[in-house]
Amino acid sequence: PPPPPIHSPSPSGGGGGGGGGMDPFSMMFQQGGMGGSGMMGSMGGMPGGQGMSMNMGGPGGMSGMRQSATKPAPPRYDAIPPGTVVSLKGLVNASDRNGDRGVVKQYIPSSGRYVVVLEDSDDTMSVKASNLLQHVHVRIHDIQSQPELNGKTGTIIAWNPGKERYAIYVMALEKVVSLKPGNVVLEAGTCAQLTGLSSRPELNGKWGTIKDWIRESNKYDVQLSAQQVIRIKVENMRV
């Protein structure tokens, strides 16, 4: 009999973190619009699996497999992870697309662009990071004027460049609040852009992955590469 279908897990990313049960943005994409699991499932159910075993059976096949089985690409710390829910912003040539939502499919290092699959269609666009807003989960911290917000979780839904504030949908309160980046703690694993660094201006514009948040100092440990981790203030990271 053919082997049972193989189902791959849903892509994970900043947009699909914990606490997404009531999050409308996560719910939009919980069906797994990439179709990856379906493809893997259909491959797993094909009787051709036996043919694959036969191809690997000979000595030449095994050696060929060993030669072609290159090491997996090292993890990137400077790219938004596949599966992250985003919306388009600041597009000039396709301004009618600004505000459209989608999911990051992959990062193309040679062009520095992301392939984004748009919501409710199979259309894809090649977009620069500067034209993406990540709808990632956050935790609110150190609001003096509204202490009842502190500790609440929410989702970034917009960025106001004029006021330099995020619009955050707070799930528990079912309302949107406008907050400065210094009061918005991004989840570990989020890839964000460094900005506003005066002590190390050469790092401004670079991207890194948040490893940890240090509550006492309100700073992140940010991984820039396999060898480099730096500690910077929360307000110096933007998505």
Image (cartoon, rainbow, N blue to C red):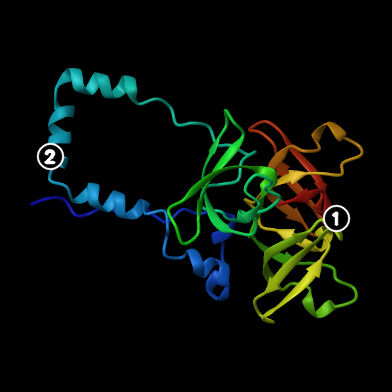
Question: How crowded is the residue under tag 1: few (<14 C-alpha within 10 Å), some, or many (20+)?
Answer: few
On the image, the x and y values in percent for residue 36 come to 37, 51
**Which tag, 1 or 2, sits closer to the chain's start?**
2
Residue closer to the observer: 36 or 144: 36
Question: On the picture, is 92 further left or further right than 197?
Answer: left
From the image, state whether disc 1 or disc 2 is nearer to you. Answer: 2
Residue identified by numbered label 2: 50
Amino acid type of the residue that numbered disc 1 sits on in the rendered structure: Ser
Amino acid type of the residue that numbered disc 2 sits on in the rendered structure: Gln
Going 31% across and 55% down the picture, which residue do you hit? 38
Among all residues in the image, which is located at the extreme left?
A: 1
On the image, the x and y values in percent for residue 228 come to 71, 33
Is residue 29 visible to the viewer in this orientation of the structure?
A: yes
Question: On the picture, is 200 further left or further right than 46?
Answer: right
Going 74% across and 55% down the picture, which residue do you hit? 213
Residue closer to the observer: 117 or 171: 117
Is residue 19 visible to the viewer in this orientation of the structure?
A: no
Residue 109's quadrant in the figure? top right
Going 30% across and 49% down the picture, which residue do you hit? 40
Label 1 residue SS: loop
Label 2 residue SS: helix
Residue 214's quadrant in the figure? bottom right
* Real-space Cα separation, disc 1 to disc 2, in angstroms: 58 Å
Question: On the picture, is 108 further left or further right than 205?
Answer: left
Residue closer to the observer: 212 or 190: 190
Residue identified by numbered label 1: 217
